[in-house]
Image (tube, grey):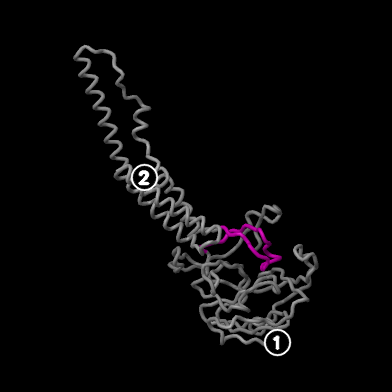
């Protein structure tokens, strides 16, 4: 039994390691949520088996060994043999009760894995900002926290909402599954909610016919391109934030050929005008001329929402970035 379980566990752990490595190095398009769910389930099964079968069996075997040694000592004593090498001390007991390696690496890790699973699936999840589409609000290398329950509690992997909470509001910074490729997580700002008409013409934002208030801000220095770009402050639904505009980029948008509700958008030479359909959201990056967003690939369905971003918890290149960006 021990040998069989060791072999089975070795195969399972090797499969997990191979999948994780292939996912990390980009060989496959993995699903971390699914991997974590499987790890929680498998280690949970080992934990239950340990609690109700393997540990009681070891305890029974340990007590049996102690009784066997005691009977042997008594038998030798009756034969007049007072000294013997037979003994059963606390060290021997602990050795017999200790978990084999295959339980230590499964059942022993279950409490940690289930804690990570609950925290990541229902409370908070960390993300790393990989691109500059949300500059100046978020910078490349920012490690952020995302509130997973703010927009409602969702089941992991299938992302089905089971408990409603807040609805996304204009100005929120939201993480969502990228509609053309749902295995990828994107982060943008909510610009339009269901029923809104969003227009971005000549690099000016209008929502429901009302221009979004904009103020001039000091030019922003782009460290990657080693030049300054124009920076503006916007006030959308009471949310104040800064955006960037690059005068070297033209205002027109080249959309993807097909996406859901493509008929809700029109693309004049000056930019784009879209009517947000029910159950969907229009997203844009704050770095307006360097963001692949709803102007190009359409709307984000409610089922793709991951959570609300709210805090930079680390940036190893700039510790001053730590803090709330709301």
Q: Secondary structure at mark 2?
A: helix
* Residue 154, horizontal then vertical, whole percent: 46, 65
Residue 269: assigned label:
1
Q: In which image quadrant can residue 2 be found?
A: top left
**Between tags 1 and 2, which lies in front?**
2
Please state the extent of the stretch shown in magenta in the rendering.
Answer: 126-149
Q: Secondary structure at mark 1?
A: loop
The quadrant in which the C terminus is found is bottom right
* Residue 277, horizontal then vertical, whole percent: 54, 82
**Whether label 1 touches label 2, CB < 8 Å:** no
Residue 146 in magenta?
yes
Q: What residue sits 38% from the left and 27% below the top?
A: 91
Q: Is residue 74 left or right of residue 39?
A: left
Q: In which image quadrant can residue 259 be found?
A: bottom right
Residue 232 in magenta?
no
Nearer to me, 249 or 208: 249
Q: Earlier in the sequence, mark 1 or mark 2?
A: 2
**What residue would you read off at disc 2?**
6
Magenta stretch: dominant secondary structure = loop
Look at the picture and state if 298 lies above or below 91. below
Q: What residue sits 52% from the left and 75% below the top?
A: 301
Q: Is residue 89 left or right of residue 218?
A: left
* Total tally of numbered discs in the picture: 2
Label 1 crowding class (10 Å Cα cut-off): few <14, some 14-19, many 20+? few
* Residue 225, horizontal then vertical, whole percent: 77, 66
Q: What residue sits 56% from the left and 66% below the top?
A: 185
The quadrant in which the N terminus is found is top left
* Residue 92, horizontal then vertical, whole percent: 35, 28
Look at the picture and state if 137 lies above or below 94. below
């Amino acid at each position: 039994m021990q040998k069989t379980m060791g072999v089975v566990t070795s195969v399972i752990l090797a499969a997990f390691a191979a999948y994780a490595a292939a996912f990390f190095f980009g060989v496959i398009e993995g699903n971390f949520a699914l991997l974590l769910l499987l790890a929680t389930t498998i280690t949970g099964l080992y934990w239950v088996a340990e609690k109700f079968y393997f540990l009681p069996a070891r305890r029974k075997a340990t007590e049996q060994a102690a009784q066997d040694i005691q009977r042997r000592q008594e038998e030798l004593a009756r034969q007049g043999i007072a000294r013997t090498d037979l003994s059963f001390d606390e060290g021997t007991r602990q050795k017999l009760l200790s978990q084999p390696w295959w339980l230590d690496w499964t059942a022993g890790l279950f409490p940690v894995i289930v804690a990570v699973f609950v925290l990541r699936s229902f409370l908070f999840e960390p993300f790393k900002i990989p691109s500059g589409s949300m500059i100046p609000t978020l910078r490349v290398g920012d490690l952020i926290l995302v509130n997973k329950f703010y927009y409602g509690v969702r089941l992991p992997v299938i992302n089905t909402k089971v408990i409603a909470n807040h609805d996304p509001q204009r100005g929120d910074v939201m993480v969502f599954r990228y509609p053309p490729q749902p295995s990828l997580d994107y982060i943008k700002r909510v610009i339009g909610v269901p029923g809104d008409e969003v227009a971005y013409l000549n690099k000016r934002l209008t929502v429901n016919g009302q221009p979004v208030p904009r103020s001039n801000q000091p030019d922003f220095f782009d460290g990657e391109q080693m030049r300054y770009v124009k920076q503006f402050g916007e006030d959308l639904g009471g949310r104040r934030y800064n955006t960037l505009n690059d005068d070297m980029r033209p205002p027109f948008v080249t959309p993807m050929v097909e996406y859901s509700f493509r008929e809700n958008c029109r693309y004049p030479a000056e930019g784009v005008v879209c009517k947000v359909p029910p159950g969907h959201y229009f997203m844009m990056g704050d770095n307006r001329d360097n963001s692949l967003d709803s102007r190009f690939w359409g709307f984000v369905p409610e089922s793709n929402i991951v959570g609300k971003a709210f805090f930079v918890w680390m940036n190893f290149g700039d510790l001053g970035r730590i803090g709330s960006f709301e």
